[in-house]
Image (cartoon, rainbow, N blue to C red):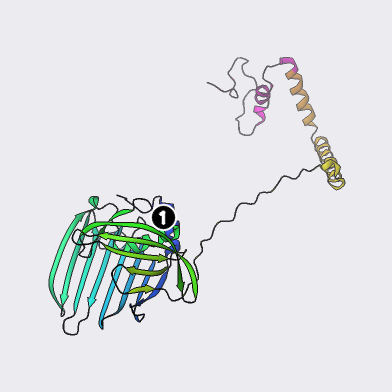
């Protein structure tokens, strides 16, 4: 069983970011009549439950509203999803407004520490007639994909235009009991959206309830993750996109320019060679002026060269460092060459 639809954290953020948008479809009956609407939105938000530090997560909201056989129906799903596609809280409301007997079902799922709590309430005529509560250990629900997380997972798969092999996850059935759900790719199809014909990628999701037959949905997506068609197998109602939206494109970084090395023969360039000669003469004149202004420089160098030829040291660099060390402003005054056998501070020690 799969544990997470996405792997690395960076990849999760990069793939989910283009999935943050709103969309709206219409509900069409089997005789072609518009009987309702269906909308989905995903956006960033801050989630701050009681006693916990505020954290950024995704707010997923879906809502369907319409009439079936003249009876108003409404379903609303609101979920807070982490960057790991884990559900930390979810609210589901379903209502069927019979004229004499309205029924409403509210289901609240919330994660607290290492437990997931589920509370289902059935309300008839504004009175609670049934309340069912249960809890699960989070360690037993690795890879749980709730109804709200499912909408985000589908968009990611649609943008990839592929479904992972053995895409089996834990989920909730219609009674909010733990079960399994599977995803499979049905390939590409043609679909008319408004006056245009577009290519869509089809994904099927099946929720295998512990009791009864599995529930199947087929989702058709445009290349950027917009939902163009949703069908629940066995239902006469179809959700359809009315107009092709402006497709969302991700910005790809421009490739780094590669500049070829241009050979430069400056000696053959009259202007560059002239500048070189001018600069050379300028430096030579500057050096000569400095030596004239500091006659002690010639005496100092002559003394050093004379001592060097007398000593003939094996390491000329170390000898020069020792010779000129007393002239350094960073060293305290001392007698030069106090001892011929004293270890030199300029030689490295092992």
- Residue, x 81% and y 42% (percent of image)? 265
Q: Is residue 250 left or right of residue 9?
A: right
Determine whether, in the image, residue 245 is placed left or right of residue 136.
right
Residue 314, above or below 326: above
Asked if one can make out residue 54 in the rendered structure from this viewpoint, the answer is no
Quarter holding residue 121: bottom left
Residue where numbered disc 1 is placed: 12
In this rendering, the answer to whether 206 lies above or below 40 is above
Is residue 194 magenta-colored?
Answer: no
Query: Which percent across, then down, holds residue 230?
Result: 36, 69
Q: Is residue 237 visible?
A: yes
Q: Of 261 and 289, which appears nearest the observer?
A: 261
The quarter of the displayed image where residue 115 is located: bottom left
Residue 269: x and y in percent read 85, 45
Residue range (magenta): 309-336
Residue appearing at x 23%, y 51% in the figure = 140
User: Is 51 drawn above or below residue 8 in the view shown?
Assistant: below
């Amino acid at each position: 069983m799969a544990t997470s639809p996405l792997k690395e954290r960076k990849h999760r953020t990069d793939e989910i970011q283009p999935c943050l948008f709103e969309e709206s479809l219409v509900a069409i009956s089997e005789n072609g009549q518009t009987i309702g609407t269906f909308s989905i939105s995903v956006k960033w938000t801050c989630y701050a439950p009681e006693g916990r530090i505020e954290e950024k997560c995704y707010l997923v909201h879906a809502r369907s509203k319409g009439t079936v056989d003249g009876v108003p129906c409404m379903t609303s799903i609101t979920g807070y999803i982490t960057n790991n596609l884990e559900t930390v809280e979810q609210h589901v409301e379903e209502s069927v407004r019979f004229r004499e007997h309205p029924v409403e079902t509210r289901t609240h799922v919330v994660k607290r520490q290492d437990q997931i709590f589920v509370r289902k309430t059935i309300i008839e005529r504004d009175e609670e007639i049934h309340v069912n509560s249960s809890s699960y250990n989070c360690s037993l629900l690795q890879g749980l994909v709730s109804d709200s997380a499912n909408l985000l997972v589908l968009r990611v798969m649609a943008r990839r235009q592929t479904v992972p092999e053995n895409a089996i996850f834990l989920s909730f059935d219609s009674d909010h009991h733990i079960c399994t759900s599977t995803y499979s790719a049905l390939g590409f199809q043609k679909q008319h959206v408004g006056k245009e014909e577009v290519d869509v990628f089809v994904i099927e999701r099946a929720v295998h309830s512990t009791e009864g037959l599995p529930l199947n949905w087929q989702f058709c997506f445009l290349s950027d993750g917009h939902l163009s068609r949703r069908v629940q197998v066995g239902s006469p109602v179809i959700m359809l996109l009315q107009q092709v939206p402006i497709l969302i494109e991700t910005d790809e970084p421009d490739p780094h320019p590669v500049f070829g090395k241009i050979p430069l023969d400056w000696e053959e360039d009259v202007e560059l060679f002239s500048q070189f000669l001018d600069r050379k003469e300028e430096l030579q004149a500057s050096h000569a002026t400095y030596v004239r202004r500091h006659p002690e420089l010639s005496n100092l160098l002559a003394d050093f060269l004379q001592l060097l030829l007398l000593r003939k040291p094996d390491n000329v660099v170390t000898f020069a460092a020792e010779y000129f060390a007393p002239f350094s402003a960073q060293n305290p005054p001392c007698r030069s060459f106090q001892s011929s056998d004293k270890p030199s501070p300029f030689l490295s020690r092992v």
